[in-house]
Amino acid sequence: MYKISLFLSVFLTSTIISFSQAKWPFAATSPTQKIIQSFGSSNVEISYSRPSVKGRVVFGEVVPFDKLWRTGANAATTVYFGDEALINNTKVPAGKYGLVTIPGKTEWTIIISKDTTVNGEDKYKQENDLVRIKTKSVALGSKVETFTFDINNIKPNEAQISLRWDKTEVSFKFSIDLDSKVLKHIDEQMATASEKDKPYYNAAGYYLDNNKDLNKALEFVNKAIESNKDAFYMYYTKAKIQNKLGDKKGALESANVSIEKAKAAKNDDFVRNNEKLIKEINKK
């Protein structure tokens, strides 16, 4: 009997150890997620864990008001900015940061911390705060079961980070100085690239879309057309530049050339784009 008991004891102990060392086969209660959004000349990334409501009262109970929250579950929540960002007039150098919050009934505190390991109040040190801002919370019309981050309202140099859980949404904006970076790149390429590699067309489009020197934009697009006289899309851009400059006659001529070349290339989209542009020009 002693030998049998000893055998069973050893067997059960080894089985428990083997089971505990094996990979747990079930889904995590609060699964991790990493969202990556192309923005500016790089990316913005948020890494976090996603708890669910599960019938509970979230804000005020599961997540107490007026206390620091890791803003997710399990490990620390982090945000990465590939370009230097600006949040509430504070410069945030490119890099990875901790993101924690202090939820309130109607207003939250958003904290961007230099410490990427903050996952609780016991690890938080206010001297590591890089950004600390307050923002109003918004009541949602329908419930969001699983905690969700989102990067939205994306513009060329500005975007918004939002978090939603249960019936609450909180957002804050950030921006980058994309303009100076693009203009510097254009200047460098114009000064150093060979003639065939100079970004004339892209530069013309950027100047047009961002309300820069339109005469310079016209110069750029004319240079681009010199090396690609059948590029219907370049004539379309030229027509838009001329229209903005108030050159109605020139804009109509360029738009009609673009239509002819687009038809030859069997590109119906640009035919329609130019026809629409001509209507806009004739209204003036």
Image: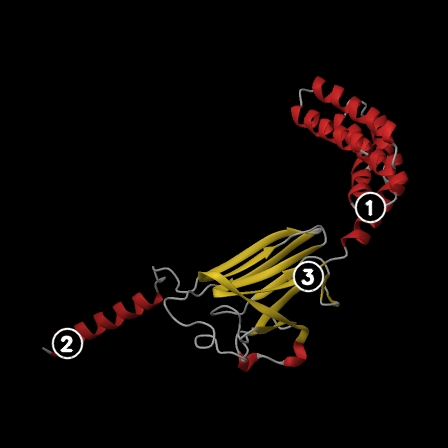
Q: Residues within 10 Å of mark 2 (few under 14, many from 20)?
A: few
User: Looking at the image, which is closer to me, 274 or 125?
Assistant: 274
Q: Above or below — where is 252 with respect to 15?
A: above
| 128 horizontally vs 118: left or right | right
The three-letter code of the residue at mark 3 reads: Phe
Q: Give the spatial CA distance, label 1 vs label 2.
A: 86 Å
- The residue that mark 2 highlights is 5
Q: Can residue 227 be seen in this snapshot?
A: no
Q: Quadrant of the C terminus?
A: top right
Q: x and y percent of residue 89 in the render? A: 75, 67
Of marks 3 and 1, the one in the foreground: 1
Kindly check if marks 3 and 2 are in contact, taking CB atoms under 8 A apart as contact.
Answer: no
Residue denoted by label 1? 211
Q: Which mark is residue 127?
A: none
Question: On the rendered image, what quadrant is the N terminus found in?
Answer: bottom left
**Residue 252 to residue 158: above or below:** above
- Please identify, in this view, whether the residue under mark 1 or under mark 2 is nearer the observer: 1
Q: Residue at x 66, y 27 (%)?
A: 269
Mark 3, residue position = 174
Q: Residue at x 76, y 28 (%)?
A: 278
